[in-house]
């Protein structure tokens, strides 16, 4: 064996009882699992892991590292947590497939999520080209962790029909279908939507159904950020479940929570919808992060009509006093679709990042009202990220217990004061919700973070500690593992995660990031 991990507590990802064993790694795979009492393994290198737990590497089912993986070779925000695979292309907006126009528009629209695109040198235009770029990574060596990709429905719509709020023509819908199919053929694992983000939000049920049928035909899954997490949340969940029933497409509900005052204590109603769909044979799963605040761009709160025509058209409307007053009324009085049908409470909106360094004074502040928000949107050219303190702990705990739950950070890495979920989600599950609160057992939690997402991604060789499986592995101390990241210090690394292996190579050893870049694209199984 190249490596033997000696006398470790194996939490193998099945959800079954943990056990002590020696685990051998060779050729990037788990080569042997020798249980306590059997003859010990021998190897070229031996890691004494007494007192540690060994689990499959964690799968971040909802990541916004589309550019971060190509910008930062260390990528400690995820590697240090034990994440070995991220799913990108989320919320219907990412950087492939695209032409030059679309790429430039999307770049502006989601600068608050990912920062600028210029420092990455986007030499791709297709999904396959983007996945190839991940494989090349830094100097041809690869990237920090493995990555899968979802075809972003909003980007596809922008590419074909622009940022217009209208149904597509027959020819346009045919082209959208072709782009989704091509993305899946090139390796995407499914399709995402952002149905509170333009232009994806302009798609009606028929359009979504047509695209979901394409996804279903390739064995992929649909991952919607649905139309409301606020006033219309339960109806929005029901719409997505009905869409899955109609099309036969597997469904994965993105950051599935219930926010704002109208939804406090309503998690049982959501879980009843899920259980009903499962009883009907719907293939559904979901992900959550273990925190109450959300995070998005400031521009995302605005009504959908204000975005029509794209980012430059929105900026023009913001400069027009009469139109800006209409936006304010929608935000503060009626409740805009961008803010989930709930009138915005400005004291819940905290600036977490800006694109223009001259505006850093705003970071960490709560916006006093629309006038200041409007000034910031114009000055930062829509590149402002915000936290929204609108969640409920009871809903978070109830949803994470469900049998189809998986973990997803929704981690936005851009900005001076990002949400701590980007650096802390997975250790926070293990420290806070397993050890301290007992919401989940250790074995249950590891299954939620490993084998369940691997099954959703249809990966036959990841998500378990089993002979022949990829050696994506994390070793942690169950007694001390915890998120270091807080809202005050969100970029603090976790504790209690001394070793992480990606494809059999140490990405973290003895608590320190190595220079290994063993991550590659993970493409849809044919």
Image (cartoon, grey):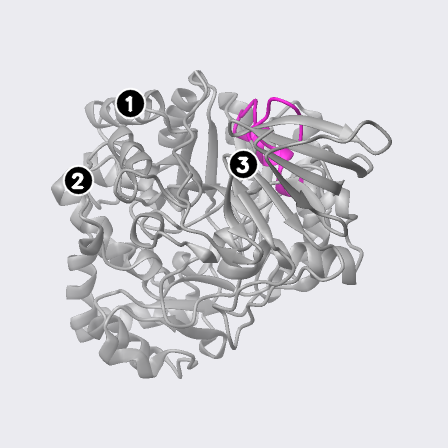
Q: Which of the two residues, 446 or 341, is positioned nearer the viewer here? A: 446
Residues tagged 1 and 2 counted as in contact (Cβ below 8 A) = no
**Label 1 crowd (10 A; few <14 / some 14-19 / many >=20):** some
Residue that badge 3 annotates:
252
**Quarter where residue 385 is shown:** bottom left
Classify 295 as above or below 130: below
- Location of residue 277 by image quarter: top right
Q: Which residue occupies the foreground of this view, 480 or 351? A: 480
Q: Is residue 66 visible?
A: yes
Residue 338 position in % (x across, y down): 39, 58
Check disc 2 and report the residue beneath it: 123
Q: Which residue is mark 1?
A: 182
Circles 3 and 2: CB distance less than 8 Å? no
Point out residue 129 in the picture as x, y percentages from the top left corner: 24, 32
Please name the residue shown 46% across and 62% down the image: 295
Query: Badge 2, how many Cα within 10 Å: few under 14, some, many 20+?
Result: few
Question: Which residues make up the magenta segment?
Answer: 448-470
The answer to which quarter of the image holds residue 404 is: top right
Q: Quadrant of the N terminus?
A: top right
In this orientation, does residue 194 appear? no
């Amino acid at each position: 064996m190249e490596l033997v991990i000696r006398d470790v507590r194996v939490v193998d990802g099945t959800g079954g009882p943990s056990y002590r064993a020696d685990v051998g790694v060779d050729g990037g795979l788990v080569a042997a699992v020798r249980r306590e009492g059997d003859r010990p393994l021998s190897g070229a290198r031996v890691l004494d892991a007494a007192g540690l737990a060994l689990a499959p590497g964690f799968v971040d089912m909802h990541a916004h590292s589309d550019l971060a993986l190509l910008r930062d070779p260390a990528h400690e925000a995820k590697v240090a947590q034990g994440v070995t695979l991220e799913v990108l292309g989320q919320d219907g907006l990412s950087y492939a497939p695209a032409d030059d126009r679309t790429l430039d528009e999307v770049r502006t629209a989601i600068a608050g999520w990912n920062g600028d695109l210029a420092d990455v040198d986007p030499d791709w235009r297709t999904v396959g080209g983007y996945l190839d770029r991940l494989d090349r990574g830094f100097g041809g060596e690869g990237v920090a962790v493995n990555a899968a990709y979802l075809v972003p429905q909003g980007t596809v719509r922008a590419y074909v029909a622009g940022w217009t709020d209208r149904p597509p023509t027959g020819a346009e819908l045919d082209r959208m279908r072709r782009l989704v199919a091509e993305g899946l053929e090139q390796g995407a694992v499914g399709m995402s939507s952002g149905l509170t983000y333009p232009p994806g939000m302009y798609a009606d049920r028929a359009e979504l159904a047509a695209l979901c049928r394409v996804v279903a035909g390739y064995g992929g899954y649909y991952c919607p950020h649905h139309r409301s997490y606020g006033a219309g949340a339960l109806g929005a969940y029901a719409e997505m479940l009905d869409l899955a029933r109609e099309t036969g497409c597997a469904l994965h509900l993105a950051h599935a929570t219930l926010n704002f005052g109208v939804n406090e204590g309503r998690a049982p109603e959501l879980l009843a919808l899920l259980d009903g769909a499962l009883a009907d044979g719907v293939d559904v799963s979901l992900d959550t992060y273990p925190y109450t605040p959300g995070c998005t761009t400031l521009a995302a709160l605005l009504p959908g009509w204000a975005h029509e025509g794209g980012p430059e058209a929105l900026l023009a409307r913001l400069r027009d006093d009469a139109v800006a007053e209409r936006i304010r009324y929608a935000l503060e009085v009626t409740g805009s679709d961008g803010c989930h049908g709930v009138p915005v409470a400005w004291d819940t909106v905290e600036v977490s990042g800006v694109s223009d360094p001259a505006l850093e004074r705003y970071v960490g502040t709560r916006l006093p009202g629309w006038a200041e928000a409007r000034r910031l949107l114009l000055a930062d050219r829509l590149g402002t990220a915000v936290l929204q303190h609108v969640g409920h702990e009871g809903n978070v705990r109830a949803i994470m217990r469900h049998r189809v739950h998986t973990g997803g950070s929704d981690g936005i890495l851009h900005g001076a004061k990002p949400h701590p979920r980007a650096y802390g989600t997975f250790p926070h599950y293990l420290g806070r919700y397993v050890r301290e609160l007992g919401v989940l057992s250790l074995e249950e939690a590891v299954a939620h973070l490993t084998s369940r997402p691997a099954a959703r991604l249809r990966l036959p060789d990841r998500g378990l500690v089993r002979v022949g499986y990829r050696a994506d592995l994390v070793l942690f101390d169950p007694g001390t593992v915890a998120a270091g990241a807080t809202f005050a210090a969100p970029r603090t690394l976790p504790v209690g995660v001394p070793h992480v292996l990606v494809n059999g190579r140490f990405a973290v050893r003895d608590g320190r990031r190595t220079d290994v870049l063993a991550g590659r694209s993970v493409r849809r199984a044919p």
